[in-house]
Amino acid sequence: MTTIRAAFLPLTDSAVLVAAREKGFAESEGIQLDLVRTTSWATLRDRLVYGQVQAAHMLAPLAVAVALGLSQQPAALAAPFKLNINGNMLVMTADFAAALDPDLPSRLADPLAAAHDFASAIGLYRRKPVIGVVHRFSSHALSLRYWLASAGIDPDRDVVLRVLPPSLMVEASRSGEIDGFIAGDPWPAAAIEQGLVEAVALGARIWQRGVEKVLAFRTEWMEDNAATIDRFLAALTEAARWCDDPANRAELAALLARPDYVDQPAAIIERGLQGLVIPRASAAPIEVPDFLIFNREATAFPWRSQTLWIYSQLVRWGQVKPSRAAEQAAASVFRPDVFRRALGASDVAMPGASMKLEGAVSAPIGVGAYRGALTLGPDRFFDQRVFDPERVADYIAGFDVPR
């Protein structure tokens, strides 16, 4: 039995790791999976970089930022497996939400209109709203910046972005420290449940298949333990399938609700797993079938085009100076070659390419695969832009940064 210590944060999207341990998928591959609960992304990053754990449930942009030397100690990190896509929600207090479309389903269905309404709210309120983000280098921060800028809001001038661990967002909303936040489930749902905030935008409507958490390793350790990695990815694949099965949602919610994992009511967690969003306390739930995805549509496959999209946004916001070396370093974080090696002999439908146009699919579509049938779901960005990973500079140049 090989022991792997993996750090995680209390979030619903830690589900695949939790299921791998609790349902025996890791043990059946000869792996004793020890899960190390951590409060902040910065601490999780340090545990991985300094070798306290061998693996981590990590924000995809944070893995890229560490590899680029943007976030504390630079280190070579590798992400051969994605743990989920989507799952985030932007919520705001009633003061700011009052200027938005009162028809909640319409508001959530049209992020572009909501962004323009929010821009008006800032003008009416005559002060900068303080919005909590879970880390500077997070998909939350990148999608929030994208959303704000679509309405001419400069995220570095017109609002205050405050970094807080996701589990502290509810209390920060209650105390008035922040006017809203963007985070993964169940924290936005918990804040809505307590009447502190209401939903403003969904991650799954800003980018329909937005990359979220990855399984990250130090590259050197991953390459020195190839056989263990292959068995671990096989275990996680079975766990992800189990998590995506509607028949298992109640059991999964009960597991995640335990104090040693997410420590929130199972009912709130299960609602997110079902794709049900209650946008305001006591409001009727809205069905969002792609709110959080663990397995279907090749969720776990680490498309290099997605890590390059992350790089494009870091460049857009001046967080990294564009260069060929930086672009290559960012692209090297996602490791489809390791995914293929580990699962090549399994029944997993394997994409025939490692990059694709991001944002080009408007309806489910079958794509080329080495084995089996593979269908990709709609992946449109809310502004209808398409990211071509072969033309990163042109894509970045297409944005009018409001500054």
Image (cartoon, grey):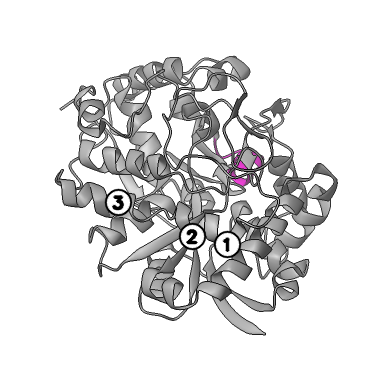
What residue is pinned by disc 1? 342
Element marked by disc 1: helix
Q: Does residue 23 appear to the left or right of 147 in the view shown?
A: right
2 or 3: tag closer to the N-terminus = 3
Amino acid type shown at disc 2: Val
Q: Give the position of the N terminus as an image quadrant.
A: bottom right
Tell me where residue 330 appears, x and y as whole percent: 29, 51
**Of discs 1 and 3, which sits in the foreground?**
1
Classify residue 312 by image quadrant. top left
Q: Residues within 10 Å of mark 1 (few under 14, many from 20)?
A: many
The answer to whether residue 167 shows anywhere in this view is no
Name the residue beneath numbered marker 3: 330
Q: Amino acid at mark 3?
A: Ala
For the C terminus, the quadrant is top left
Q: Where 132 falls versus 358 (above or below)? A: below
Check whether the beta carbons of the residues at disc 2 and disc 3 lie within 8 A of each other: no
Camera sees residue 240: yes
Is 102 within the magenta?
no
Residue highlighted by disc 2: 338
Badge 2 density bin: few <14, some 14–19, many ≥20, Cα 10 Å: many
Residue 249 has which mark?
A: none
Amino acid carrying label 1: it is Ala
Residue reaching furthest bottom? 1
Q: Is residue 397 left or right of residue 202?
A: left
Question: Which element carries disc 3, helix, strand or loop?
Answer: helix
Q: Nearer the viewer, residue 220 or 295?
A: 220
From the image, state whether disc 2 or disc 3 is nearer to you. 2
The one of 163 and 344 positioned closer to us in this rendering: 344
Circles 2 and 1: CB atoms closer than 8 Å: yes
Question: Which residues make up the magenta segment?
Answer: 189-197
Residue 126 location, quadrant: top left
Q: Closest to the observer: 66 or 190?
A: 66
